[in-house]
Image (cartoon, helix red, strand yellow):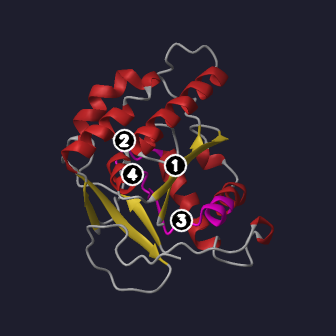
Amino acid sequence: MLRLLCVTAHPDDEAGGFGGTLALYGERGVEISVVCLTAGTAARNRGGTKTDAELAEMRTCELGDSCRLLGVKHWEVLGYQDAHLADADLPTVVGELVKRIREIRPHVVISYGPDGGITGHLDHAMAGVFATVAFQWAGRSDRYPELGAPYASQKLYYATTEYKLPDRQATGPPVITASIDIGPERFEKKDQAFRQHKTQQPLFEFVRKNLDRPPLVEVYHLACTREPQRQKFETDLMDGVTEE
């Protein structure tokens, strides 16, 4: 069985950023895991919760509802401080991701790039930084030997974009090297997965509008591979991946 790991910053990223891709590969029988670094407690939209603890519990439950709809088999929230991932200790966060990579043994890892994706969100950017270092270090016997046997995933992709949102900080989106055709049914599943995050209801229509530009595709940048290879344009993140 092929395995895919998605590393995100907040509950709802798995849907808004990667939902069509997760739904597609879930349907194809790929075993999908999502690791979310924060519980999203810095969100302005709080769903009537009174405390950060209440919001964290609700958003974690919403993540589960979204993941089940998308066909994700395993998910967890690591509980780092929302809006402060840039202040988190890099070796500590990377160690947690290395541990998961060695346990899950994903053939492919997807995350944001250091640009922070279409929103340029700093937490998204840091999720990509942590995921990139973990991708490299998980396969090394001289990094975190106490966290299990080394395991090297075969590919790391960054979510990227064909357009920019207005009134955002400057970013340099990674070059598009892969385009995934999610089709109309998976687009609707992606939208419905985002709507499982009921605390974020005020964002539903805004997000759908931007999900629809351009429609029915999610685009990626192939950032790293286990084995050296020349760049080629892809339409399948599992292209060239071998089962182990």
Q: Is residue 3 above or below residue 15?
A: below
Alpha carbon separation for disc pair 1 and 4: 11 Å
Residue 116 part of the magenta segment: yes
Alpha carbon separation for disc pair 2 and 1: 18 Å
The residue identified by callout 3 is 106
Q: Residue at x 44, y 29 (%)?
A: 197
Closer mark to the observer between disc 2 and disc 1: 1
N-terminal of the pair, mark 4 or mark 3, is 4
N-terminal of the pair, mark 1 or mark 4, is 4
Residue 83 is left or right of residue 232, and the answer is right
In the rendering, at what x and y percent does residue 172 appear?
A: 35, 59
The residue identified by callout 4 is 22
The image quarter containing residue 173 is: bottom left
Closer mark to the observer between disc 2 and disc 4: 4
Q: Which residues are magenta?
A: 99-121
Q: Residue at x 48, y 84 (%)?
A: 227
Say whether marks 1 and 4 touch (CB < 8 Å). Answer: no
Closer mark to the observer between disc 1 and disc 3: 1
- Give 206 or 234, whichever is nearer the viewer: 234
Q: Is residue 146 above or below residue 141?
A: above
Give the residue type at disc 3: Pro
Say whether marks 1 and 3 touch (CB < 8 Å). Answer: no
Alpha carbon separation for disc pair 4 and 3: 14 Å
- Give 83 or 220, whichever is nearer the viewer: 220
**Any mark on residue 73, and which?**
1
Give the residue type at disc 4: Leu
Q: Residue at x 20, y 41 (%)?
A: 212
N-terminal of the pair, mark 1 or mark 3, is 1
N-terminal of the pair, mark 3 or mark 2, is 2
The residue identified by callout 2 is 16
